[in-house]
Image (cartoon, rainbow, N blue to C red):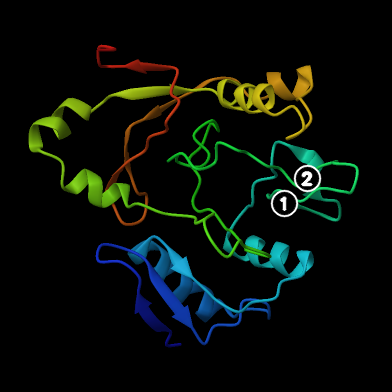
């Protein structure tokens, strides 16, 4: 099955047209979409109207979706779908998770014991100005590093903590979400990750980094 592509950026990213993701997608189309993701890293689709069940079904077609840790904003019948935004009830109760520091560059999922295969975002409502979700290719970034820096990064690991990140959010904005229970905190221990990751399918190397690592192994702090 052929897919129409429109490049978004020079190094990565394509817009795909004539693809209906709300309907049940065939195995052939799924294979093409996964190949497109491996090749281009970012896929953009326009004009879709998802219901939570449609979106959950799509996520499961690509693999095993993660259930968001801040469970209060997960859709009850479809917990793999979680809401992010600044909408509130009339009395100021948040209806979605709102991270006011979300403008900072980051890699999703570094506080998990595994690396995520992909992030799925569906824009229900977006501001007319600002609020852009931007992307950079850390594979392209690695490939264009000086060889000396590549050698220095070989074997270096970073220590990541969900709580270091999450506690700052809730301290800054207590209404953003409910604090985790002791059991939920214990289920999220600190985790080490290699800064240089090798994609298990393409073999391409990329930088796996975050803005708030709490420690490094294999390199001096300074």
Q: Is residue 77 left or right of residue 12?
A: right
Sequence-wise, the earlier of marks 2 and 1 is 2
Where disc 1 sits, the SS reads loop
Residue ID for mark 2:
73
Residue at 63% from the left image edge and 39% from the top image edge: 99
- Image quadrant holding the C terminus, namely top left
Residue found at x 49% / y 51%: 117
Element under label 2? helix
| As drawn, 174 above or below 62 | above
The label shown at residue 83 is 1
Residue 190: name its quadrant. top right
Q: x%, y% of residue 27?
A: 56, 77
At 76% from the left and 51% from the top, the residue drawn is 87
Total marks placed: 2
**Distance between mark 2 and mark 1 Cα atoms:** 6 Å
Q: Is residue 210 visible?
A: yes
Q: Residue 212, position in %: x, y?
A: 45, 26
Looking at the picture, how far across and down is residue 12, in whole percent?
31, 63
93 and 215: which is toward the camera = 93
The answer to whether the residue labelled 2 contacts the one labelled 1, judged by CB atoms less than 8 Å apart, is: yes
| Percent of width and height locating residue 90 | 89, 48
Residue at x 36% of width, y 79% of height: 6
**Depth order, front residue of 188/70:** 70
């Amino acid at each position: 099955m052929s897919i129409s592509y429109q490049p978004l950026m020079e190094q990565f990213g394509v817009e795909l047209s004539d693809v209906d993701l709300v309907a049940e997608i065939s195995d052939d189309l799924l294979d093409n979409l996964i190949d497109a993701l491996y090749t281009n890293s970012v896929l953009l689709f326009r004009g879709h109207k998802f219901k939570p069940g449609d979106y959950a079904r799509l996520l499961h077609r690509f693999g095993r979706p993660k259930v968001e840790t801040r469970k209060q904003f997960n859709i009850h019948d479809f917990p793999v779908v979680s809401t992010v935004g600044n909408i509130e009830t009339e009395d100021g109760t948040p209806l979605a998770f709102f991270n006011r520091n979300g403008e900072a560059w980051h890699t999703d999922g570094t506080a998990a014991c595994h690396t995520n295969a992909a992030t799925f975002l569906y824009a229900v409502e977006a501001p007319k100005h600002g609020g852009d979700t931007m992307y950079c290719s850390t594979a392209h970034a690695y490939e264009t590093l000086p060889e000396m820096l590549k050698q220095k990064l070989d074997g270096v690991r970073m220590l990541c903590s969900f709580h270091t990140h999450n506690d700052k959010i809730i301290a800054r904005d207590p209404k953003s979400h409910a604090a985790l229970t002791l059991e939920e905190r214990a289920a999220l221990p600190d985790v080490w990750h290699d800064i240089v990751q090798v994609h298990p399918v393409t073999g391409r190397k990329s930088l796996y980094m975050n803005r708030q690592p709490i420690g490094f192994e294999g390199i001096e702090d300074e």
